[in-house]
Image (cartoon, rainbow, N blue to C red):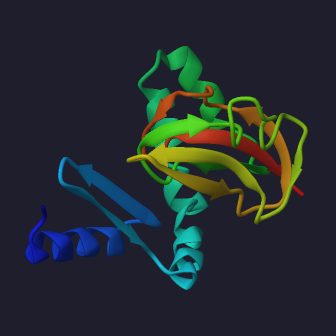
Amino acid sequence: MLTMEEIRELIRLLDDSTLTELELEFEDGKVRLAKRAEVVSYAVPQVAMPVAQAAPAPAAQAAQPTANAAPAAVEDPALHVITSPMVGTFYRAPAPDAPPFVDVGSQIGPKTVVCIIEAMKLMNEIEAEVSGEIVEVLAENGQLVEYGQPLFKVRRT
C-alpha cells in the first residue's frame, strides 16, 4: 500500500497536470484521485493553445524533404489546427461501435468535443475551442499521439 507521502506526491502530480482523474490498482488495494468539476473547467482552456501550438506543425513538416516543406509555409491563415494537449491514444468516437464525434464537414463550436485522448486509463474529452468546419482529420483512430501533435484542421467561421 502507498504511504501518505506517496499519496501526497500523487495529488501534487494530478494538480500540476491537465488530467482530471487518476486511478492506480495494486495487489493489496487501489487509489482513485479526481479533481473537482470547477478545476476541470479551468483545465480545459489549456487544452489547445493555437499560438503556442502552431509552431510544432511546420517544424515537423520541415524535417521532411524540402518539396513538402514549402506548402506548409503558405498555409491558409483561416485554418486552425487542434493539437493534442497530452501524450495518449487518440479516439474519434466515445465507443468502438459509436459514430465519430466529428467528421470532415462537421460544423463545430468552441465547446464541441472532437475526440478523446486516453492517458493512463483516463478518457479526456478534447474540445474544439474554436467555431468552424472540420476540413481534415490528421490522426488515425487508436493511434498513439504526442503532446502538440496536430489532430484536426478547422476552417474558422
Rendering coords of residue 131 (x, y %):
83, 60
**Residue drawn at the location 24% of the way across and 57% of the way down:** 29
Rendering coords of residue 106 (x, y %):
89, 43
- Left/right placement of residue 28 relative to residue 48 reads left
Quadrant the N terminus occupies: bottom left
Quadrant the C terminus occupies: bottom right
Rendering coords of residue 36 (x, y %):
50, 81
Question: Which residue extends farthest front?
Answer: 28
**135 w.r.t. 30: above or below:** above
Q: Can residue 148 be seen in this view?
A: no
**Residue drawn at the location 47% of the way across and 15% of the way down:** 65
Picture quarter containing residue 101? Answer: top right
| Front one among 50 and 63 | 50
Q: Can residue 129 be seen in this view?
A: yes
| Front one among 43 and 11 | 11
**Residue drawn at the location 41% of the way across and 44% of the way down:** 87
**114 w.r.t. 5: above or below:** above
